[in-house]
Amino acid sequence: MSIQTNLTKILDEIPQHVKLVAVSKTKPPSDIMEAYNTGHRYFGENKVQDLTAKQAVLPTDIQWHFIGHLQTNKVKFIAPFISLIESVDSLKLLKEINKQALKNDRTIDCLLQFHIAKEYEKFGLDMAEAISLLESNDYAEMQNIRINGLMGMATFTDDMEVVSREFKVLKSYFSRIKTEYFPDQESFAEISMGMSGDYQPAIHEGSTMVRIGSLIFGERKKSD
Ligand SMILES: *Cc1c(COP(=O)(O)O)cnc(C)c1O
């Protein structure tokens, strides 16, 4: 199957209000161009070096999403162009994003990443950490970031009951944070959940954004 066929098939299958981020990590620019040529513009990368290398050679109207663990000392490399940072998992990181956004005279859209999986090694905030971030003076003073919702990764398992339960938890966090902290911010609307193996239950549980890699571009060699 070609990249174009795979992409079109998924776009036909998911509801229109659900955004598709084509996760192109480890894949070459030529693969991204195949998807781009169907009209697709949303792509996700999880490593700063790979992202900047690809961004430099690909069309400027691509909307790049950063979906991996982001080190504060690397924010400056993506701040000029990044469309959405989906993986904000600390106040320290958000402060640095705000600082670099200011330097670039722009606002950077972000999602708060939550830890909802059983796997210990996955990154993300818990509810208490998110609340302390949102109630901090530092956050109150940030002028150059905008939080548009939450992101989370479910446990890597075939057990869709486990996965659905975790997505439900993320959805409930979203509702609570929306009500308590963003009732008047229309742009706080995104729940980014669902990948190749679990996007269907994710959409069922209320996902507004799915991040799909291997189903579009084929299996990756490493499991990252
Ligand atoms: C790799 C990755 C994806 C896509 O994974 P697939 O299983 O290939 O669809 C989605 N989200 C994040 C955060 C990832 O790192």
Image: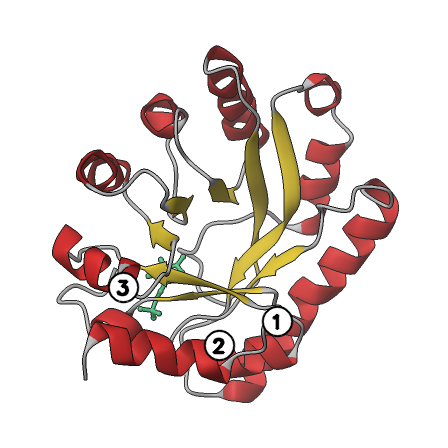
Q: Residues within 10 Å of mark 3 (few under 14, many from 20)?
A: many
**Residue located at (81% from left, 55% from top):** 176
**What kind of element bears circle 2?**
helix
**What kind of element bears circle 3?**
helix
Name the image quarter holding the C terminus. Answer: bottom left
- The residue tagged 3 is 35
Please state which of the two labelled residues, at mark 1 or mark 3, is closer to the viewer: 3
Q: Residues within 10 Å of mark 1 (few under 14, many from 20)?
A: many
Answer whether labels 1 and 2 touch (C-beta < 8 Å). Answer: no
Answer whether labels 3 and 2 touch (C-beta < 8 Å). Answer: no
Q: Position of residue 114 (x, y in %)?
A: 58, 53
Q: Is residue 177 above or below residue 173?
A: above
**Residue located at (21% from left, 34% from top):** 56
- The residue tagged 2 is 199
User: Residue placed farthest to the top in the image?
Assistant: 103
Q: Tell me how far mark 1 sits from mark 3, CA to CA.
A: 28 Å
Callout 3: CB less than 8 Å from ligand 1: no
Please state which of the two labelled residues, at mark 1 or mark 2, is closer to the viewer: 2
Q: Is 97 situated left or right of 136 in this image?
A: left
Residue type at mark 2? Tyr
Residue type at mark 1? Phe
Quarter occupied by residue 197: bottom left
**Residue located at (57% from left, 87% from top):** 161
Q: Position of residue 211 (x, y in %)?
A: 43, 63
Name the image quarter holding the N terminus. Answer: bottom left
Mark 3 or 2, nearer chain start: 3
Q: Tell me how far mark 3 sits from mark 2, CA to CA.
A: 19 Å
Mark 1 or 3, nearer chain start: 3
Q: Residues within 10 Å of mark 2 (few under 14, many from 20)?
A: some
